[in-house]
């Protein structure tokens, strides 16, 4: 019997988030027989995709999490909920650590206390690798974990906690280190949407034609979120419990390149200005991932080009603005 037949009840934490909404849409298409449930903290449920049943709760509340896990008895859990912005962690270190660590602890502990052993995909981040030397690129899963900010530290803790619950309790935890993923519906805290929204507002006459930017020298490995959630699904099916997997494209682009592509799609001339408020006191210069472990196991490879993703994002931002 394949996992596809076995996995009937899915729980997605952070279901209202950017990746959560894409994942629900994708699972509805590939596993139409499955029952999808999602946890939501604050979002307006009426604005979310309709393929899931949403449960409003604070994952930091242990009792509420235990109650939900006992009620649903999920066969699989995609744990996506988190404070997901490294920039925000610089201003709110404890909030970031507490949210990310406590939520996951409650989730894993609830499974143990309910005598359940669902397959659990824990989504951490390429930020776990911190600052890497050029000769260490592309980064494999064997690279040391070196926190460069509090977000990174929270994700390393989540990663190691996943390992601990696998070792200590035999919980089938699969750890995913997701590199930057971008696409429609992402929050404006993140660079792609931030820049695309500025272009859309300028085109609509809602902003003077000046684009404000931060550090354009940083380089990131950007995956289209539709490819990212496909990787999550494949890892849920084929991932080996206890193991960790990078989700990346193997290519990196500077933020300058991202800006140039978006500007090339603009219908109006735009002047670019550096904004000191957008510069981070510490910013990882480069992240480029090696996805061979994922690719060899599942056959996954990225399918959507960077330029196409950026075109889709700008189109989406133009619609948001109007
Ligand atoms: N947000 C933002 N706004 N970033 C800017 C700007 C700007 O105006 N200008 C330059 N940047 C640079 C940042 O300094 C950073 O180097 C890069 O753009 C990407 O920033 P973000 O899009 O905010 O993402 P991130 O890399 O900090 O974090 C994302 O990727 C991680 C994986 O590496 C998030 O998706 C995390 O959740 C994820 O774990």
Image (tube, rainbow, N blue to C red):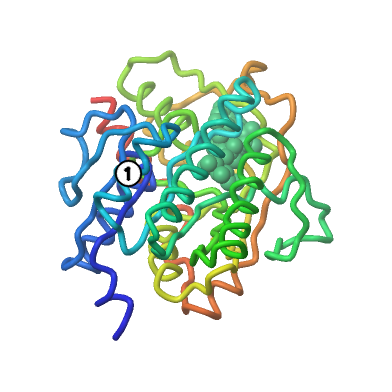
Ligand 1: give its quadrant.
top right
Front-lying residue, 36 or 265: 36
Q: Residue furthest bottom?
A: 1
Using the image, determine if residue 155 lies above or below residue 213: below
Q: For the C terminus, give its image quadrant.
A: top left
Image quadrant in which you'd find residue 177: bottom right
- Residue name at image x 59 percent, y 68 percent: 243
Callout 1 secondary element: loop
User: What is the x, y in percent for residue 150?
Assistant: 67, 33
* Whether residue 299 is situated above or below residue 276 in the rendered picture: below
Q: Please identify the quarter of the rendering in which residue 228 is found.
A: bottom left
Q: Is residue 308 visible?
A: no
Q: Is residue 52 rendered to the left or right of residue 2? A: left
Between residue 51 and residue 285, name the one nearer to us. 51
Snapshot quadrant of residue 168: bottom right
Q: Position of residue 275 (x, y in %)?
A: 62, 18
Whole-percent x and y of residue 142?
A: 73, 65
Judge from the rendering whether residue 111 lies leftward or rightward of residue 98; answer left or right: left
How many numbered circles does the render carry?
A: 1
- At horizontal 35% and vertical 47% (from top left) the residue drawn is 20
Apparent side of residue 75 relative to residue 304 in the rendered image (left or right)? left
Residue in view at x 50 percent, y 34 percent? 83
Q: Which residue is mark 1?
A: 15
The N terminus is located in which quarter? bottom left
Q: Residue at 66% across / 41% down in the picture?
A: 152
Classify 10 Å Cα crowding around label 1: few (below 14), some (14-19), many (20 and above): many
Closest to the observer: 170 or 269? 170
């Amino acid at each position: 019997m394949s996992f596809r037949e076995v996995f009937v009840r899915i729980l997605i934490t952070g279901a209202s988030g950017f990746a959560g909404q894409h994942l629900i849409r994708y699972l509805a298409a590939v596993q139409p027989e499955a029952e999808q449930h999602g946890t939501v903290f604050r979002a307006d449920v009426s604005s979310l995709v309709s393929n899931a049943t949403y449960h409003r709760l604070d994952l930091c509340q242990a009792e509420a999490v235990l109650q939900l896990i006992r009620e649903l008895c999920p066969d699989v859990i995609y744990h996506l909920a988190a404070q997901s912005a490294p920039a925000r962690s610089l201003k709110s270190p404890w909030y970031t650590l507490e949210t990310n660590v406590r939520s996951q602890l409650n989730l894993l502990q609830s499974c143990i206390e309910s005598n359940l052993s669902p397959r659990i995909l824990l989504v951490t981040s390429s930020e776990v690798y911190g600052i890497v030397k050029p000769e260490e690129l592309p980064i494999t899963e064997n690279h040391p974990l070196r926190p460069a900010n509090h977000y990174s530290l929270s994700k390393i803790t989540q990663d190691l906690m996943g390992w601990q619950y696998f070792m200590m309790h035999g919980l089938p935890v699969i750890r995913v280190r997701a590199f930057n993923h971008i696409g429609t519906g992402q929050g404006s805290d993140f660079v792609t949407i931030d820049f695309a929204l500025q272009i859309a507002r300028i085109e609509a006459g809602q902003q003077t034609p000046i684009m404000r930017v931060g550090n354009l020298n940083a380089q990131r490995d950007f995956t289209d979120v539709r490819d990212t959630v496909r990787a999550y699904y494949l890892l849920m099916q084929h991932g080996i419990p206890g193991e960790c997997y990078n989700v990346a494209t193997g290519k990196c682009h500077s933020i300058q390149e991202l800006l140039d592509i978006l500007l090339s799609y603009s219908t109006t001339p735009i002047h670019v200005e550096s904004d000191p408020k957008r510069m981070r006191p510490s910013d990882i210069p480069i992240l480029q991932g090696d996805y061979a472990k994922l690719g060899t196991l599942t056959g996954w490879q990225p399918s959507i080009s960077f330029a196409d993703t950026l075109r889709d994002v700008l189109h989406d931002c133009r619609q948001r603005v109007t």
